[in-house]
């Protein structure tokens, strides 16, 4: 309102000096960028904020009841939730390690060798990423049921490894694309056998790619809901527990755990940046 | 006679239908600086890679210091390679790059320290041990690659166009440096290049390759002064070739009648196994250019033509002359500043000594994929 008034009483836009106009347009990009960034971090900020929400024994979640550290001091006050988080972390770590190893090997094979079925493997990776989760989850469930595999942590891990392999493979393959094969020849030339060459030259050089793929896999695994829901049986994971809790209200511990997981991810990303800087 | 260090016997390498290397026989002596020279696709790099162990020959055998290495992997051969791309390990310091080979051999710590320092001194990069390869210039990386190979004291060092990525001035400097280092360490060097000047500057002997075969193998001077084939003549600098008939080979100097009616005299020994039609040639810097007046001086070969292009290069003049029977002849005349340079369009006479005339075997014309030199 005051802006409009100022324009009407003062100089109109046509009378404004060229410098003023340029100053105004110079603000467009920062403001626009700021809004987009705000849009991206808003949910995270809300999560962090609600971790400090005061709530008594009653589970009322989406109303601000005042600042409190209750969620932090009583982080493990809900045994079900704690078990679910432990399950999620265990599943994420195990499936990330397995998927990282398998995905890296697939990437090496796809980049290094021409073999029968290479095109098909490539296509399967792409399909795995693009297929709707609901389809993967449902079909995996019917597979487990028809083979009589009891659903539990094991089936969740199998499912998570399945959808994580493709992400690791694609990330590592991008890293391998610019890899100078002469480096491996040079290592062999200097007396290193195939294993030493892999350990001393290949692995250190693609490590950043494997780490990036692994982090992606960890993030995808720890918050997966759809596929997990199909294959969990009676096992609770963090996302499954939260989904169940929504109907009755989410305790602040959930937001605190979310904040901690997020903080952990940020920490690893920062460490990675620092390591890259030091290497360069 | 020094010991033979590397011996290739009937080595052939096929990639599908293509024979990259075709029944190659080669012996390189202990302590020699030997070059394989040829256009891209001639098989020189494939030959080097087979000696290094990166490719397996389709047929034939390779022995190193008397022992058969034909099917040994690279890490079991006492050979080290300087790669064209240097292939320094980007994640390791210069020290660790150079120490890589010694660590594989479990050389003890203080010895590693000493030898790495020694080899950095050898390539004139003392104090560079803590840096990373990306912090070095191309020329410095090149030296590190050399140090990394030499520190292992291999029986044979393979160099795959190691100077290709450097600018001209640095390349000239590194040529002399390489030669000095080779003499200092006394290791056999096998050098692969497509640069004829580079090969001639450094080598004790060199072989010109084409289509997977050796066209000629000799010391640089003889290779240049009397190339055996048309291809070698063309590859090692500019050459002037004239086709002619042997008229008389009874005395020490034979007469060859070239197109256009002139007679060129050639040392008869060079015509062995040739004729009656031959191609004779002469290097451009051997030719004296003068105005086409009166009789040519006795004891010189003489051919007449019309001066087409005259180019001033600084140290010399370069002339292009239309010779007899549509031939184009090149002349390099040192810029002595004494005589007035002939003008374009004038009739000129090209004079050279009979002993500077060489005889070549005709080669197949250049294929499309071969580099013009």
Image (tube, rainbow, N blue to C red):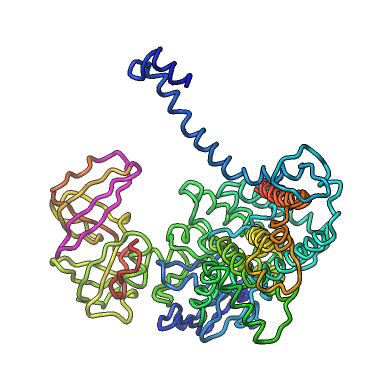
Return the x and y of residue A64 as percentages of the image width and height: 72, 40
Residues B89 and B2: in front is B89
Relative horizontal placement of residue A85, taking residue B262 as reference (left or right): right
Q: Is residue A261 above or below residue B34?
A: above
Residues B202 and A60: in front is A60
Count of numbered tags:
0
Residue A81 magenta-highlighted: no
Within the image, what quadrant is residue A245 found in? Answer: bottom right
Position of the N terminus of chain B, as image quadrant, is bottom right
Q: Is residue A253 above or below residue A15?
A: below
Return the x and y of residue A228 as percentages of the image width and height: 67, 69
Residue B322 magenta-highlighted: yes
Position of the C terminus of chain B, as image quadrant, is bottom left
State the residue at coordinates (74%, 61%): A241
Q: Residue A267: tell me if it is visible.
A: no
Residues B29 and B338: in front is B29
State the residue at coordinates (64%, 74%): B74
Specify start and end residues of the magenta stretch as a single range: B314-339
Q: Is residue B229 above or below residue B341?
A: below
State the residue at coordinates (42%, 61%): B196
Within the image, what quadrant is residue A148 found in? Answer: bottom right
Q: Is residue B10 above or below residue B321?
A: below
Q: Residue A37: tell me if it is visible.
A: yes
Residues B237 and B261: in front is B237
Return the x and y of residue A263 as percentages of the image width and height: 73, 48
Return the x and y of residue A170 as percentages of the image width and height: 56, 65
Relative horizontal placement of residue B150, taking residue B221 as reference (left or right): right
């Amino acid at each position: 309102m005051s802006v409009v008034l100022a324009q009407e009483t003062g100089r109109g836009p046509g009378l404004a000096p060229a410098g003023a106009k340029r100053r105004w347009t110079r603000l467009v990009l920062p403001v626009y960028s700021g809004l987009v960034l705000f849009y991206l971090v808003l949910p995270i900020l809300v999560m962090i904020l609600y971790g400090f929400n005061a709530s008594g024994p009653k589970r009322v979640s989406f109303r601000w009841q005042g600042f409190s550290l209750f969620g932090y001091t009583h982080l493990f006050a809900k045994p079900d939730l704690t078990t679910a988080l432990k399950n999620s972390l265990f599943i994420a770590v195990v499936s990330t390690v397995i998927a990282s190893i398998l995905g890296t090997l697939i990437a090496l094979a796809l980049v290094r060798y021409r073999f029968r079925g290479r095109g098909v493997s490539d296509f399967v990776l792409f399909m795995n990423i693009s297929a709707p989760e609901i389809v993967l989850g449902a079909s995996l469930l019917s597979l487990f049921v028809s083979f009589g595999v009891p659903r539990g942590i094991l089936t969740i891990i199998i499912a998570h490894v399945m959808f994580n392999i493709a992400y690791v493979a694609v990330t590592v393959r991008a890293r391998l694309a610019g890899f100078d094969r002469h480096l491996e020849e040079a290592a062999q030339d200097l007396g290193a056998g195939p294993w030493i060459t892999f350990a001393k030259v290949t692995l250190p050089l693609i490590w950043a790619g494997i780490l990036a793929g692994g982090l992606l896999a960890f993030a995808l695994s720890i918050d997966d809901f759809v596929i997990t829901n199909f294959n969990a049986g009676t096992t609770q994971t963090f996302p499954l527990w939260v989904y169940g809790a929504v109907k009755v209200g989410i305790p602040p511990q959930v937001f605190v755990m979310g904040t901690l997981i997020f903080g952990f991810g940020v920490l690893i990303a920062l460490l990675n940046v620092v390591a890259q800087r030091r290497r360069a | 006679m020094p010991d033979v260090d590397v011996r290739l016997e009937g080595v052939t390498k096929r990639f599908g239908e293509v024979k990259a290397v075709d029944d190659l026989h080669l012996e390189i002596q202990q302590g020699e600086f030997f070059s394989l020279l040829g256009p891209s696709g001639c098989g020189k790099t494939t030959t080097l890679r087979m000696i290094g162990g990166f490719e397996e020959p389709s047929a034939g055998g390779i022995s190193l210091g008397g022992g058969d290495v034909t099917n040994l992997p690279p890490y079991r051969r006492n050979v080290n390679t300087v790669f064209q791309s240097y292939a320094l390990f980007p994640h390791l310091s210069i020290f660790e790059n150079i120490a890589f080979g010694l660590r594989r051999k479990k050389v003890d710590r203080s010895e590693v320290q000493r030898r790495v320092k020694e080899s950095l001194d050898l390539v004139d990069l003392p104090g560079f041990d803590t840096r990373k390869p990306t912090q070095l210039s191309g020329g410095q990386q090149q030296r590190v690659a050399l140090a990394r190979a030499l520190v292992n004291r291999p029986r044979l060092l393979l160099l795959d166009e190691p100077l290709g990525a450097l600018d001209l001035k640095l390349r000239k400097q590194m040529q002399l440096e390489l030669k000095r280092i080779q003499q200092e360490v006394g290791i056999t060097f096998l050098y692969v290049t497509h640069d004829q000047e580079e090969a001639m500057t450094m080598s004790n002997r060199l072989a010109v390759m084409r289509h997977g075969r050796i066209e000629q193998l000799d010391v640089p001077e003889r290779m240049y002064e009397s190339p055996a084939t048309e291809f070698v003549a063309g590859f090692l600098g500019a050459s002037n070739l004239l086709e002619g008939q042997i008229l008389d080979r009874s005395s020490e100097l034979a007469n060859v009648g070239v197109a256009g009616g002139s007679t060129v005299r050639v040392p008869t020994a060079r015509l062995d196994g040739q004729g009656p039609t031959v191609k004779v040639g002469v290097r451009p810097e051997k030719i004296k250019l003068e105005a086409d007046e009166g009789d040519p001086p006795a004891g010189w070969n003489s051919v007449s033509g019309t001066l087409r292009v005259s180019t001033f290069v600084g140290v010399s003049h370069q002339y292009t002359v239309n010779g007899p029977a549509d031939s184009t002849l090149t002349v390099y005349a040192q810029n002595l500043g004494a005589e007035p340079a002939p003008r374009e369009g004038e009739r000129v006479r090209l004079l050279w000594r009979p002993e500077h005339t060489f005889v070549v075997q005709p080669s197949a014309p250049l294929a499309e994929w071969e580099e013009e030199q």
